[in-house]
Structure formats: C-alpha cells, structure tokens
Image (tube, rainbow, N blue to C red):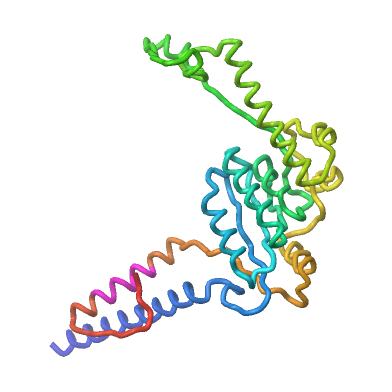
Amino acid sequence: MKQKRIWIGLGVIVALLIFFFSILFIIGRFSGARPGRFVFGDKIAIVEIKGVISQSSGIIEELQQHVEDDGVKAIILRIDSPGGGVGPSQEIYREIIKIRPKKKVVASMGSVAASGGYYIACAADRIVANPGTITGSIGVLMQFSNFEELLKKIGIKGMVIKSGEHKDIGSPFREMTSEEKKIMQEVLDNVHQQFIRAVSEGRKMDYSKVIQIADGRIITGEQAKNLGLVDEMGNLQDAIDITARMVGIEGKPNVIYPKKRLSIWELLMRDMASAVIDVLNEKGYELNFPLQIK
C-alpha cells in the first residue's frame, strides 16, 4: 500500500513537471516568437514567398499588415520559388507596386527565384541575389496530355457535350486542331508580353532588351546582375543591411521574421500539456494561469 502511494506520488510529480515545462515551452513559442516582433523603434519586416506560387491572399494580407504598422520602415521579400500561377504572381506584383510609394521593398533571392518568383521580385525597389541563385526563366508554359491512343488500346472512348466549338480545347481525349493550337499560342504570347512589360517597367529596362533574354532560359544570380535583372550580390543578411541603409536605420536593425509554423514536436508538446490539464482537473486540482491554451 505504501509502495503504491509512492508510485502515485512520483507519477503526479512527473506529470506536473511535464506540464510545467510544456507551459514554459508554449509561452516562449507564442509570446517571444522571433526577435523584432515585440520591440519598439524602426523595424524591417521579412515576408517569405516559398515554393510553388498557387495563391496570393496570405502573402497580400501579410504585406498589408506591415504597411499599416508605422514602425515598419521597409519590407524584404525573401523569395525561394520556381514560379507558379500567373494570376497569383501578378496579384502579388501589383500589391508590391502599390506599397512602394509608402515603404521601401527589397527582394532577397534564395536558392531559386525564377519565372513567377522573378516576376514578383522585379516589382521591388532593389533586388539582391546570391551568385548561384537560379533565376530568370522569363516565359510562360502550358502543358496538355493526350490519352487518345492509350484509351483506344484499352477500349475506352471519351464523350464530350459542349456549347461551343472550342469549349473542350485541351481535352485529353483528342488531338488539338491547328486552329486550337493557334488560339492557345496567342493566349501564351499575350501573357508572355505582360511578363516582359512587367520586367521592363520594374527594372527600368528597354522592352527590346528584355525580349532578347525572355526566351524562358534560366540564369544564375551573377549572370542576372550582368544583364541588369539584379542589383547586388548578397545573402539575406546583406539584404537586411542594404535595406537598413536605404531607410536610414543606424546600427543593427530590428527585424520582424515570419511566424514560424508549428512542427510535429511542438504540436505534440501542446497536446501533452492539454492532456495533463484534463487529467489534473479530473483529479480535482484547480490550476490558475494567466495563459489560456486553446
């Protein structure tokens, strides 16, 4: 009986210790976040554009929050993206153009900032890239698959009912007609011209000069600088220093980093803390903390 009480006591102590450290972990994670988020004075905000660009709403919302913060004097776009959708890239580009009269915007290229990634970058006041950054790829691409022959071999026939002659353009059930190919080519050429115009206006380059390198080729950051597509060589810290000088911040600038997403370990720790609270509540313990875990 005595031994049983000892084991129960040890179990409660262990549970309390786990709970205590979980609370400390969560408080440190959600209140302190990263340096610069809760400081006074002039700040530089970093907005990350990572991976394939498939939507713009989250990035635009983040940009608008920094614009409304009077303490944020400039924004750095940390781009590490091979490109993505035309629409989302254009929406982010447009938002940056609207921000520039209010705050300085600098693009910092990571390992890759190509196609839509570069489209967005050229809206910034200044572009900083690593010598080996993969960038450029000023072009537009559409890809279609044709399963007509495969379907014939396995005895499947596609059926389409349409309201217009070209409503099923790009269908995988049949080959494109020459007229349909012409239509799609015209669409691509128009979007390509929009891309070239955006680069020309953003980089203040002659339209004819941009056309010469707008054939979809990828280039390094060093090559891009020689072509006028990038302003300076440097990493993220160099971009921070350059931005600070642009807005007149002396000394080490306060930097607002993007909110870090919770890892699996952090989620487990949060769930563990919640479970400990439930167990203690069931046993009749009442715990009062200023932090609410939701």
Where does the magenta region start and end?
269-278
Residue 158 position in % (x across, y down): 39, 14
User: Would you identify the image quadrant in which residue 217 lies?
Assistant: top right
Q: Which residue occupies 66% across, 45% down?
A: 117
Q: Is 146 rendered above or below residue 284?
A: above
Q: Is residue 7 left or right of residue 20?
A: left
Q: Which residue occupies 54% across, 43% down?
A: 54
Q: Is residue 128 visible?
A: no
Residue lying at the far right in this picture: please name it: 226
Predominant SS along the magenta part? helix
Q: Which residue occupies 34% across, 79% down?
A: 19
Q: Is 223 rendered above or below residue 38?
A: above
Residue 275 lies in the magenta-colored region: yes
42 or 25, which is in the foreground?
Answer: 42
Q: Which residue occupies 35% across, 82% down?
A: 17
User: Would you identify the image quadrant in which residue 194 lies?
Assistant: top right
The quarter in which the N terminus is drawn is bottom left
Residue 39 position in % (x across, y down): 60, 78
69 or 47, which is in the foreground?
Answer: 69
Residue lying at the far left in this picture: please name it: 1
Q: Is residue 141 visible?
A: yes
The quarter in which the C terminus is drawn is bottom left
Residue 106 position in % (x across, y down): 72, 58
